Image (tube, rainbow, N blue to C red):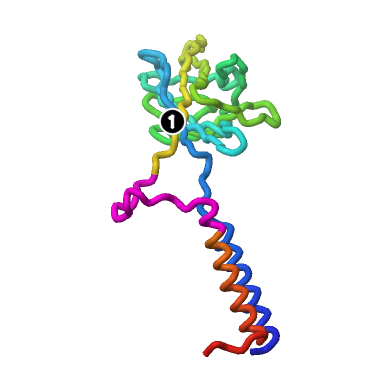
Amino acid sequence: MSRLGRSIAIASILIFTALLAVSPSCQGAGHTWDVEVADQPEQAALSVDAVFSILMLDGDRITGCTLTIRNTTEAPVTIRWDESALVQQDETIHRLTGTDMLYVEGAELQAPGLIPPGAAIQGVVWPASPGAEPIRIEDGDRIQLLLPWSWHEDQEQRSQLWEWQFIQRPLPEEPGDPMESPESEEPTAANWWLIGTGVLALAALGVLLLTGAIPPLW
């Protein structure tokens, strides 16, 4: 075997064995989030659904909110985006922008914020202030959406609140292998060390064979 071929083979063996030795399974954040409607106005002119994007890394944070807003009445409704806001549990207020809202049902292009009867708009809303940071959340926290609106004809402003609660739940345990013995246990750190040592020993033997340091055994 040429020197180049031997070098490639040696590098491949070392990389492969290193991956085997250090890659027992890793768990992620260990939990998931349920977002439940905690409160909503009764007989409201608007129906609001929210989907929150949550980043679970170094503390869980909301990084975005997709709203679907439907006009359930028989008259046009105008959303007052300049006065809308997300309100945290500690009463921190985040003013919103709705410039990216699009009509998804029942309407052609209309004036910004105008929702015809039976139509719906959808889009991502986020604090309007430049450089707005993600919103940190903990188990049990609540967030309110303040959504001022008016009938398109009289322009008299009304405000309504929707509220969601964030509930942290552990990830479900993976089902065990029915063929495994009840006494079987997951490999311990010592077991992983022994496995890694054995793999590295086999790799070293392969390197010696490839370099000709010891004669082939066959």
Disc 1 crowd, CA 10 A, few/some/many (<14, 14-19, 20+): few
| Magenta residues, dominant SS class | loop
Is 177 contained in the magenta span? yes
User: What residue occupies the far left of the structure in this picture?
Assistant: 178
Is residue 109 in sight in this rendering? no
x and y, in percent, of residue 22 in the image: 58, 58
The answer to whether 120 appears left or right of 182 in the picture is right
The number of numbered discs placed on residues in the rendered structure image is 1
Question: Which residue corresponds to the image point at 42% horizontal and 19% vertical from the top-left?
Answer: 38
Q: Can residue 3 be seen in this view?
A: yes
Question: Which quadrant would the N terminus be assigned to in this image?
Answer: bottom right
Q: Is residue 183 above or below residue 139?
A: below
Horizontal side of residue 96 vs 71, given as left or right: right
In this view, 119 is above or below 13? above
Task: Please tell me in which quadrant of the rendered image residue 118 appears.
Answer: top left
* Residue 154 horizontal side relative to residue 7, left or right: left
Q: Which residue is under mark 1?
A: 34
* Residue at position x 56%, y 62% in the image: 196
Query: What's drawn in magenta, residue-wise?
Result: 174-193
